[in-house]
Amino acid sequence: MKNVGLTVCGNRYEIKLEDDFADFVNKDLSDAGVNLHTDNKPDKLLKAYLRLAKQATSYEDEIELLIETLDGL
C-alpha cells in the first residue's frame, strides 16, 4: 500500500491505495497538472476528473464498437 496525497485550498488529503493504482493515480494527477507537494486550486482537480471522464467515455465507445464488430462476424 502507498499513500497518495494532495493539498487543496490549504487542506491536505491522503489516502492509502494499492501500489499499482497509487502509481497510476500519482502519474495521472501529475499529467493533469495537479501538484502533489504544493497547494492546488479546486479547478485543477475538476480538470483532472474531466480528463479521466473523457478517457472513460472514449473507452466505452471503443468497447461498444468492438462488440458490434464481433456481433457482425
Image (spheres, rainbow, N blue to C red):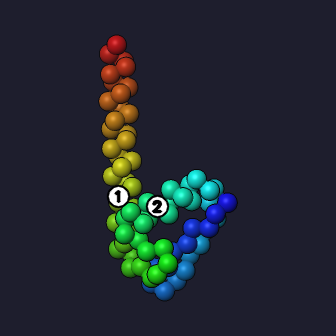
Q: Where does label 2 land, which residue?
A: 27
Depth order, front residue of 7/53: 7
Relative vertical location of residue 68 with respect to residue 13 in this rendering, above or below: above
- The image quadrant that residue 72 belongs to is top left
In this rendering, would 23 be left or right of 67?
right
Residue 68 position, x and y percent, is 33, 24
Where is residue 46, by image quadrant? bottom left
Q: Position of residue 11 (x, y in %)?
A: 52, 83
Please tell me whether mark 1 sits on a helix, a strand or a loop. Answer: helix
Q: In the orientation shown, which residue stands out farthest toward the bottom? A: 10
The type of residue carrying mark 1 is Arg
Q: Is residue 63 left or right of residue 21?
A: left
Residue at 37% in and 54% down: 53
At which x and y percent is residue 13? 56, 75
Task: Pick the quarter of the image with the N terminus.
Answer: bottom right
Classed neighbour count for the residue bearing mark 1: other residues with Cα under 10 Å, few (<14), some (14–19), many (≥20): some
SS of the residue under disc 2:
helix
Q: Residue furthest right?
A: 1
Give the numbered dot on residue 51.
Answer: 1
Q: Residues within 10 Å of mark 2 (few under 14, many from 20)?
A: some
Which residue is located at x 55 percent, y 80 percent?
12
